[in-house]
Amino acid sequence: MDALTITPIGAASTATAEKDLAPAPTPVENRLSMPAQNLFKFDGRQRRKLLAPSLWRTPWLARLVTFGGGLGLTVYGGWQMYKVIDVGGVTTLKWALLALFILNFSWIALSFASSCVGFVALLSKRRSPGLPETLREKTAVVMPIYNETPSRVFAALQAIYEDLQATGLGERFDWFFLSDTTNPDIWIAEERAFIAIRRRLGPNARIYYRRREKNVGRKAGNIEDFVSRWGGSYAHMVVLDADSLMTGPTIVKLAAAMEADPDSGIIQTLPLIINRNTLFARVQQFAARIYGPVIAMGLSCWMGRDGNYWGHNAIIRTEAFARHCGLPDLRGRPPWGGHILSHDFVEAALIRRAGYAVYMMPTLGGSYEESPPSLIDLSIRDRRWCQGNLQHSRVLFGRGQSWASRQHFLTGIFGYLTSPLWLLQLLVGIVIVFQASYFKPEYFTSEFALFPTFPRFDAERSLELFALTMGILLAPKFFGLLVAAYEPETRKGSGGVIMLLISTLFEVILSALLAPIMMLIQTGHVVHIVFGFDTGWDPQRRDDGSVPLIDIVRRHRSHMAMGALSLVAGLLISPSLVAWMSPTIAGLILAIPISWLTSQRWLGLVFRRAGVLVTPEETTTPPIAKRGKALSKSLARAEEDEINGIEAIHADPELRALHEAWLPARKPRQRGVITADRAVAEAKIADAETIEDAVAWLNRGERLVALSDRALIGMLARLPRKVEKHPQAAE
C-alpha cells in the first residue's frame, strides 16, 4: 500500500458497492448496561476480590520519597521564607505572602521529588515487553471524532490499521469511527471517506462508522454510546483521540498486558508529541520528548496500580468500564454542574474504586499525539480543561475513592489554581514594597511590643531562597536533559549533546517568557469559571496554519498593557523591583510579538533546519507517522473535505442511497408537530428551482436537517442542475 488511488464513489456501480460494503456501517449490536454511578454512595463490600493479588505491590519507597521529600522541602522552604520576612517582625501582608509562597512552593517541591524518583527509575528502566504470539480476546479500537478534517482522521486510522495487520494479529481487532460531528458538510465527507477506506482495505477489514445525531455527554457520552451498544462483543477497547497515532505492536502489547493481568482496568501509555512545525508547538514537542519521560516515570513509580487516565492512547477493560464508569451529571448548571468535562480522571477513580488497577506503561513507546500549534489555540483548549479540572472539586470527596485518586484530582485543580496564586503572591509582594516606599509603615502591630515592626526583608536570605526555588523548578528539565544525553538513541536523534544543551537553554528562556502570559490567561479562565461562564466544546485546530495577527493583537493587548503598567509602576516604586520582576514584565510587554512569532510555521522550520529543538522522532520519523502523513496528503488532494454536503448527495446517487440507508429509523412525524428548522428547510427546497438555489439558500442548521430527513433528501434529489448557457448559444 505504498500508493493511494482515489476512486470517485459514483464511478463504481451499485452492485460493486453492495459487494464492497457491508449492509450497515456498524456491526450487530451486543449491548452492555452502563448505569450512572453514585459518586457519594459506595459500599466497600461490593468491591471485587482480586484475581491476581501477587501483582499488587504498593510502591512504598517511591511514595515516601515523593511525598515525604515534597513535604520536607516545603517545610524547609516555608521556614526560610519566614526568616526572610521576619526582619523586624511579621505584618499581616507578610503573613499573606508567606501563606501564598507555601502553597506555590509545595506544588513545585512535590513535582521535584516525583521527578527525582522518575530520574533514578529511567536510568535503570526495564525493556519493553515483546510481541505475543497469540491473543485470546477481541479488542475494539475506537476513535471519537467531532467536526475533524476527515482526510486526517481516516488516514491516521488506516495507518494504525495497516501497522497492526503487519503483526499478524489483526483478526483480534475491530475498528470504529465514533462521530459526534454536527457540521453537515463534514458529516457527508466522513461518509465518503468511510466508503473509500472500506474500498481500499477490502471487505475483510472490520472498520465501522457510527454518527450520533446529538452529542449528549460530549466525548464521554460518545464512548458510553459505543460501550452500551457494542461493548458486549469486546473484552477491551483502545481509546484514541482524533490526533492519535499508535503503532500496531504497541496496541498488541497493551492487549497482551491486559490479558496477563485480570485485575487491570485501564493501562495508560505515554503519548509523545510529533508532527509539529510552528515554533510554539516545537517547544512543546521538545519539552514533552526530553522532560516528559522523567515526569511520567516518576508518576508511574509512585502511583503504582492507583494510577490515572488521560482520556486517550490507553486500553480499557470494557465490561468493568460499563459496570462502574457511567458518569452522572453534576447538580446545577455549567460551568460547575452538568456534564463532567474532564471525564477521564473520574472514570479512573471509579474503576479503581471498584477494585480494578489503573497504571501506566511509560516506556512502552509507539504512542503519539499532536499539540496545539499556537499560544491562542492552547489557551482555547486550556479553558475547557480548566473548567473540567475545577469541576473535580465537587468530585474530590466522593465515597470509596483511593487517596491516590483524590491526589490526581488535587493535581488537576491546583494545576490551574497555581496561576492566580502566583499572581496574588506577586501582587502582595508589590504592595509590600509600595507600602514601604510611599506610605507610613505599620510600625506598631495590634499586639504589645517594645520595639516597632519595620516592613523589611532579609535580602541575602531572599536571594538564596530564590535560587533554591529556581533550582527546584528547573531540576526536572535538567534530569530530562541528563537522561537524553545518557541514552544513545535520544542523544543522536536530538543532534548530540551540544545541540541538546542549546535546545534546552532556548526552551527554558522561551518558557520563562511565555509563563507570565499563561499565568494571566489561566487566571482569566479561573475567574470566568468562578463567575459562572461556561466554556462550551469547540473542535481543536490541528493544522499548522498561522494565526492572523489581528486575532493575536485582540487576545494579548490586555497582557501587553498589564506589562507596560507593571513597568511604570515598578519604576515609580523601586528600580530593584523592576529588576526582580524583569522576566514577568518582559514576557507581558512582548506578549503580542512572542505569540505571533511562535505561531509561525516558517520560523519553526528555520529552527528545525538549524537543528534546534529537534527530537529523535524528527530525525528518524516513525514509519507509522510517515504513512499517516502520506495518506493524509493523498486523501486531501481529492478535495472532498470541504465539498458542500447537499451538492455531494445530489451529484452522487450511490452516496445518496447509502446515506439514506444509514440514517436511523424514525417514528412517523406527529401531525401538527413541526420544528422551525425543518419547516424552513422544506419551504426553501420547495421554492428552489435548481439545486444551486437550495445550496445557496439553506444555512448550516437547515442543511443538517435536510440531510437527516429522507423526505427532504428526496426533494433535493429531484431538483435539476442549473443549465449554463454558452455564449454562442446566446447569440
Image (tube, rainbow, N blue to C red):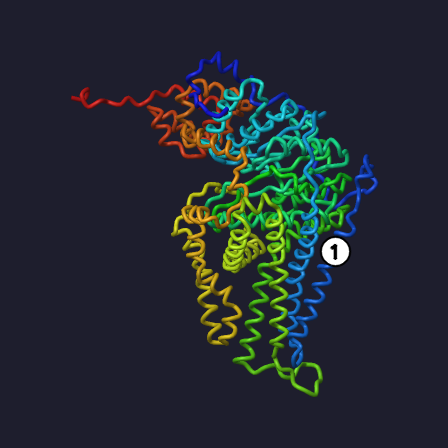
The image quadrant that residue 471 belongs to is bottom right
In the foreground, 472 or 517: 472
How many residues crowd mark 1 within 10 Å: few (<14), some (14–19), many (20+)?
some
Asked if residue 524 is positioned above or below residue 667 in the image, the reply reads below
Residue shown at the point (62%, 45%) measured from the top left: 342
For the residue labelled by badge 1, is the local secondary structure a helix, a strand or a loop?
helix
Please state the horizontal and vertical placement of residue 76, each as a whole percent of the image: 71, 67
Please state the horizontal and vertical placement of residue 118, each as a whole percent of the image: 68, 50
Asked if residue 616 lies left or right of residue 266, the reply is left
Residue shown at the point (70%, 47%) measured from the top left: 124
Please state the horizontal and vertical placement of residue 98, each as a whole percent of the image: 65, 69
In the foreground, 379 or 212: 379
For badge 1, the amino acid type reads Val
Asked if residue 118 lies left or right of residue 558, the reply is right
Please state the horizontal and vertical placement of residue 132, each as a whole percent of the image: 70, 28
Asked if residue 14 lies left or right of residue 481, the reply is left
Dot 1 corresponds to which residue? 65
Looking at the image, the residue that sits furthest to the top is 15
Looking at the image, the residue that sits furthest to the bottom is 450
